[in-house]
Amino acid sequence: MKKTTDVIYFTIFRWDNAFSSTSHSFAKEFAKQGTRVFYISHPFTYKYYFTKAGLKMIERFKGVLFKGKPFVDEDIDGPENFYSIIPKIMYPINWLPPGRFYNWMLAKNDKKVRESIDYIIEKYDVKDYILINCFDPFFQDIIPQNNPPLVNIYQSVDDISQNPYTIRHGVEQEKASATNADMVITTSSNLKEIMSVYNKEVHTIHNAADIAIFNRTMHEKFERPEEIKDVKTKIIGFTGCLDPIRINYPLLYNIAVEHSDKTLLIVGPYGENEIQQAKLHTLANVVFTGSKNINDLPQYLHFMDCVIIPFACNTLTKSIYPLKINEYLASGKPVVSSNFSIDILTFKDVIHLAEDENQFVAMIYDALLDNSSENVENRLAVAESNSWKARVEQLWYIVENFNTRKNKSLSTAKLKSQESIGMKRYVKKLNDKPALKGFLHWCLIPRNDYKPRWWVRYFLTPLIHTRGKGSRIRRKARIDVLPNNTFYLGAGALVEDYAVVNNAVGDVIIGDRSLIGISSTVIGPVTIGNDVMMAQNIVISGLNHGYEDIQFSIREQLTITNHIYIKDEAWIGANSVIVAGVTIGKHSIVAAGSVVTKNVPDYTIVAGSPAKIVKQYNFETETWDKVSKLVSNKI
């Protein structure tokens, strides 16, 4: 699909921003892999144009913004197959209250964006494409009726309710964008929980790093940047935007005071007011460089002795998987971070994770000594597993899988009939009616039980869910499936005796001719490809339970889901465990007794707890070669 499918990327992050972004990085990697990418930057408004006159970006485009068609900016430093699109100038409407007039003006702006997409489709002869709206729900009706995308994706990268500007219309607009999309992708686990209220097809694709750029930190020789040419002390570094909602400014001040014999180097955009309020401008050992291009960051990172993520712990940061974590690790630098989200916690084995400000300041002393070759290699290995190449491959896999189901290539005729009777719509409405939802849940499953009632198993399940021709479920298997999520068993597939399949919290899709072994457990969200072999006593669970709040039992806390993907022809050995969020590559093998906690590449053998790569197929020699040194799993 991806070789012939274009990507139209409509995003709130302009291509010419001084700092990197999720959409910026995704788009570049799409183009590198041979996909045509049409990157439509967030439109300028008349207000912005007239109040920011003189800015470099305004001066570049002032001659084209008022023309009758969008502008294709060819004067960019981008990869081949990449096209930067500047839409026509828009009306500023965020200041308006909700209501008819706002909706009328929104429709006018929507039309301009829709015309931009129509223009791209006609000018570049776009046939098949996917549309990704990255965190720009302020435009709703933008899909051309005559040229709809194969898949319409909304991408959530932040908690939109936590920004004073976006909260005015953003919360309601994002609900609409997420609900109307074919699927939603999020950058963090908490955002997935938020978006799952509005759309059943929600996937987490974490941020990543351009490994090649940040590996330069270790492998190239650099001259000292002008801003630190006279600095002789150890350097504590931060790269990124000093966003006042994310950054703990008092912590920055305490770091600079406690480590007064060192230099605190901050590389990135900042606000003068916040700097003055935090009194950072009064400290002689604090250096600000301002915005830098991502390609220039290795020159600064090279001279940093440790790096920090001084985020506040609040509602916004709870939903953040920061871009900079993998960039830091790819640079080999020791990292100190506040423990602000469930996603940053996953890096606890390779970073210094502080629970409070005092511990953060103290951990910097340890980080400055944390440069053993083993620890550096561990940091690099984790970063390698989190590349943008891997993230784009993950997205294509999700899209291809969705499109296959959408087009009934797996004979899922009843999936469409399920949608036609409004099942998805009713499930979404139930989330707003907890009493009714509780009653219907009781109708499906007895209280304090997890097994559906007999009428659900024998009458409702066959009516709602689909099985392919020749598929078999042994008599003693336990199929705990409900109507709110998808269950599909492919043609010729087999579920053996004493196996358990449960779709209560996420879809379970099992491909053609795949085998679920005796006494194995599959808990959604899980997608298993074609010709997958599973031995006995395997646990594959896309579900985790929250445990953090000790005031409540674990049973009462939030359930967390993260989709598991097992690609075609994989072989899973007996007594193995596949944890939530993992992807097992094509024709890969998981040895018996393994616990797989990270992605496994295609044509790879892993073993152990946690599982590590032991062999990979060499396409040049056509042999399975041993890996002499255990390395981190990557995909």
Image (cartoon, rainbow, N blue to C red):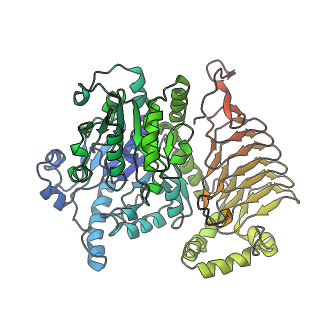
Between 152 and 171, the residue placed more toward the observer is 171
Question: In which quarter of the view is residue 44 placed?
Answer: bottom left
Q: Is residue 391 visible?
A: yes
Residue 237 appears left or right of 556: left
Question: In which quarter of the view is residue 292 placed?
Answer: top left
Between 127 and 222, the residue placed more toward the observer is 222
Q: Residue at x 34, y 43 (%)?
A: 240
Q: Is residue 124 visible?
A: no
Q: Residue at x 39, y 65 (%)?
A: 161
Q: Position of residue 71 (x, y in %)?
A: 23, 48
Q: Residue at x 52, y 32 (%)?
A: 379
Question: In which quarter of the view is residue 407 placed?
Answer: bottom right
Residue 469 appears left or right of 18: right
483 vs 323: above or below: below
The C terminus is located in which quarter? top right
Q: Position of residue 483 (x, y in %)?
A: 68, 69
73 vs 381: above or below: below
Q: Position of residue 614 (x, y in %)?
A: 69, 27
Q: Position of residue 468 (x, y in %)?
A: 74, 56
Q: Residue at x 46, y 50 (%)?
A: 356
Q: How many marks?
A: 0
Residue 334 appears left or right of 444: left
